[in-house]
Each structure stands twice: as C-alpha cells, then as structure tokens.
Image (spheres, grey):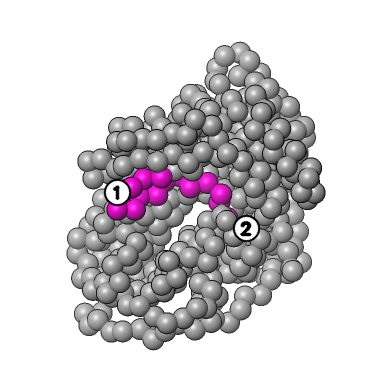
C-alpha cells in the first residue's frame, strides 16, 4: 500500500530569487544544522545547495513517484514566486530521493529548503522560500563554520561479508546460466560508526574535492557522489548518462590507458553496458521524441575506477517532467538488471538487505518540470535517529561471464569514495 505524509495544512509558500555577488564555493556556504535539512546537487563547482525546511513530504510504496508528483503540483500551484533570475534551478525548487524498491521500509523524502543558493554558468543566485506574506531580500550568504571530521571511525560488514557476497554472485551467475535473467545487479553494504555525529558537509566537501566530475548530492541524510545521471530535463531537452562495465584504476597512467582499452573491448562489460543502454532507450521512448543513442560507449575516467559510458539524448514529449522521466527510467538495468521484474526479485532474494534509497533516483526539480535526477550511487545513508552511524553501499552488474572474486574486488573499489570521505584528511 502507498502512503503520502504531508503537513495537515500546508501554508502558501512565498518565493524570491535574486542574483548575488559571491565566488565562495557552494558547499562552503552550507551552515551547520540538522542532517535532514542539508541539501546539495553540485558538480564542478556549479549546481544547488540548500538548508532549512520550508515544507517536506514523504511517500511510500509502488505509487511513491506519482504521490510525489501530485504533492509537488499542489505545492507549486499555491506558491507566490518572484524570480528575478529565470534560469534552471531558480525560483521554487525541491530536493528529493526515492527508495529503490516498492516494498522498502524507508520512504521517499522530499524537502523544499528555506534557502537555496545556485550557480550556473558562473552566475550565482539565492532563493528564499518562506511562509511569510512579504517578499524580503536576502543578504549575500557568506562562508559557514567549517565542518569537523568524523571521530574514531569504525567499519563493519553489513548484510553480507565479502565471502557471502561472492557466494551471492555465484548464485546469481547460476540463475543467469539457467536462463532466469540476463543480468542482475547485486549490492553490499558496510555499517560505519563514529564517536560523534557525522556532519554531511564534511562528506560533501571531501567528495567534491576528489570527484569533481560527479554530482555531489545530499538529501535528508543520503550523501554521495554519483557518476550516473539518470535523467536531466532542461527546457524540454532530455539527457541520460548510462554507466555499466567497470574496471579499477591502478594509479599508473600508462597502465590505466591499457586497462581502459581492454575495458572498451571486453565482451562481458560491453554486454552489460548494452543491456543498460537498451533499458534506458526503451523507457524513454513513450515519453520522448528524437532519441539519439551513440553507436558505441566511451570510457569515463574517475579517480578510483573507469566505466563504460553512453550519453543518451532526446526531446521531452507531452509535457513529461524530469520526475516523470525518472520514474519511467527506474530501475534501469544499470542498478536492477534485465528483465527488470525478474532481476529485482532475485536482488530481494540474494542481497539480504533493504537498499533503502541507495540506487534510487536522487536530485531536484523546479516548478516548470525541469530538473536533474541521478542514481544514488557511491553513497551512504546517515541514520537520522542516530547520526553517528552511516550505511555505505556498492553494487556490481552480474552477467554470465562474471567471476565472484572479481566482483568482490569491484565492490571494494566502489566503496573507496565513501570510505575515504569518512576519514580525516
């Protein structure tokens, strides 16, 4: 059963966006505050950060996306907006993240911050969102008190130890060989504890410093740096970045170039990638026109790993919003498998955990239907009841040619960003 939790009588929101003169890094503007009220969507210094909570919403179950769209439609319809900037990300916006599975015990979480600072094409703007009837200007925000690192960090296996994960991979390969599915993505988690509450701002800054070509995000305690853009809608233009097929970097440029070439020729990785690209194109087709899928992938180089990547482009049709497109794409083969329903069923049987919002859509949307949604990868979920604890995740695409020990090694590589971010510099 689906449920939606909203304020009993949501007040009218009064919104104002103005240009401000500051070159302070966006993530340095985030002030200390409750974990659930820290929001971010930043890549290479541009994007959006927000804090506070003017209004929020939780939705659950199979209709969580539709319930969220209905809530957002009601919020935007009643808002009074004065936007002096008029660009993507200005005006009324909402940050959100959604659980991977229909039956997850964790809800989707959406929050409209009280303050949002955005930067696009070098132009910085600030939006205030309030229930006050007057439209008051906001002073240019300054750098906030810097965050402190986690203390006495300890890591422990989550639902599956490395050995148990290898066994799950072997079981998945058996199911694939038996013809049940073509591909299944299996994840594992680590449980991390700190002596003091974990400040999401510390994680965001560390991730942005090391992985500036990813989207560094935070929504209601879910923090990470995803290389995978599920979908972006910008004035009707739609893009989606598909990643599937991974190899770990060595740190030696010459060796890494050779590894990149081998990745681009790997039949196992090319097969996995083809499944993922096909699933995205098929999901976009009912909602878009002029879909363009490149003939072959390129190799995306990240500090810790390299991925096969394809950028799919299209034009939104019939008023499809960014969130509607994200709902249509989720779960893609990159985080679920092929065929989707069978792969998700096997995930539930073999992973032995609730993914929560890991591998679900995460991002933002505006009142016009534009926005950007990534896949919540390379991330961790801070426990909102005990912020001294965080679960971090990594997943691997399993196909017929997968080797269990190699997949364990790949999962270890994918855990590196969050493991490193949790440690003192």
Q: From the viewer's perspective, is 51 left or right of 185?
A: left
Under circle 2, the secondary element is loop
Residue labelled with disc 1: 236
The spot of residue 329 in percent (x, y) is: 41, 38
Q: Earlier in the sequence, mark 2 or mark 1?
A: 2
**In the image, residue 176 lies at what x, y percent?**
61, 19
* Above-or-below relation of 310 to 177: below
Q: Residue at x 36, y 35 (%)?
A: 291
> How far across and down, in percent of the image, does residue 289 sit?
29, 36
Residue drawn at point x = 29 percent, y = 43 percent: 316
Please check the rendered image and state whether residue 245 is part of the magenta-colored stretch, yes or no. Answer: no
Lateral position of residue 78 relative to residue 4, left or right:
left
On screen, residue 272 versus residue 123, left or right, reads right
Q: Quadrant of the N terminus?
A: top left
Tell me if 324 is positioned left or right of 253 in this view: left
Reply yes or no: does residue 224 show up in magenta. yes
In this rendered view, identify the residue nearer to me: 235 or 140: 235
User: Magenta stretch?
Assistant: 220-239
Mark 2 is surrounded, within 10 Å at the Cα level, by few (under 14), some (14 to 19) or many (20 or more) other residues, namely many
Q: Residue furthest top?
A: 178
Q: Is residue 154 visible?
A: yes
Rendered image: mark on residue 114:
none
Q: Residue at x 64, y 47 (%)?
A: 301
The x, y position of residue 283, in whole percent, is 38, 33
Alpha carbon of mark 2 to alpha carbon of mark 1: how far? 28 Å
- Pointer 2 and pointer 1: residues touching (CB < 8 Å)? no
- Pick the front one: 42 or 38: 42
> Quick one: quadrant of the C terminus?
bottom right
Specify the label residue 211 is tagged with: 2
């Amino acid at each position: 059963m689906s449920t939606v939790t909203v304020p009993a009588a949501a007040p009218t929101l009064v919104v104002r966006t103005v240009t401000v003169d500051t070159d302070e890094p966006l993530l340095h503007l985030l002030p200390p505050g409750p974990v659930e009220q820290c929001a971010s969507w930043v890549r290479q210094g541009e994007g959006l950060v927000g804090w506070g909570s003017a209004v929020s919403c939780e939705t659950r179950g199979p209709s969580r996306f539709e319930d969220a769209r209905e809530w957002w439609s009601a919020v935007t319809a009643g808002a009074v907006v004065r936007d002096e900037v008029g660009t993507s990300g200005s005006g009324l916006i909402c940050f959100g993240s959604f659980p991977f599975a229909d039956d997850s015990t964790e809800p989707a979480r959406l929050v409209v911050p009280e303050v949002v600072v955005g930067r696009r094409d070098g132009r910085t703007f600030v939006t205030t969102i309030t229930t006050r009837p007057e439209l008051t200007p906001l002073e240019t925000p300054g750098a906030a008190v810097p965050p402190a690192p986690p203390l006495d960090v300890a890591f422990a296996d989550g639902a599956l130890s490395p050995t148990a994960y290898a066994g799950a991979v072997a079981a998945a390969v058996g199911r694939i060989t038996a013809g049940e599915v073509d591909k299944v993505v299996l994840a594992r988690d680590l449980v991390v504890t700190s002596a003091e509450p974990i400040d999401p701002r510390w994680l965001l800054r560390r991730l942005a410093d090391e992985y500036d070509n990813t989207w560094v995000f935070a929504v209601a305690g879910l923090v990470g740096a995803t290389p995978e853009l599920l979908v972006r809608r910008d004035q009707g233009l739609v893009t989606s970045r598909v990643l599937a097929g991974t190899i770990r970097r060595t740190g030696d440029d010459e060796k890494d170039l050779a590894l990149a070439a081998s990745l681009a020729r790997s039949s196992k990785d090319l097969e996995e990638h083809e499944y993922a690209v096909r699933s995205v194109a098929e999901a976009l087709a009912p909602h878009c026109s002029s879909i363009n899928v490149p003939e072959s992938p390129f190799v995306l180089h990240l500090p810790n790993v390299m991925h096969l990547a394809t950028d799919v482009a299209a034009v939104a049709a019939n008023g499809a919003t960014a969130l509607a497109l994200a709902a249509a794409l989720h779960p893609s083969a990159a985080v679920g498998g092929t065929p989707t329903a069978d792969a998700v069923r096997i995930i539930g049987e073999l992973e032995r955990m609730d993914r929560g919002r890991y591998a679900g859509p995460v991002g933002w949307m505006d009142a016009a239907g534009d926005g950007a949604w990534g896949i919540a990868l390379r991330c961790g979920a801070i426990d909102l009841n005990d912020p001294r604890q965080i679960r971090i995740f990594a997943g691997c695409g399993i196909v017929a040619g997968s080797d269990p020990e190699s997949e364990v090694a790949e999962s270890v590589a994918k855990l590196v960003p969050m493991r490193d971010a949790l440690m003192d510099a």
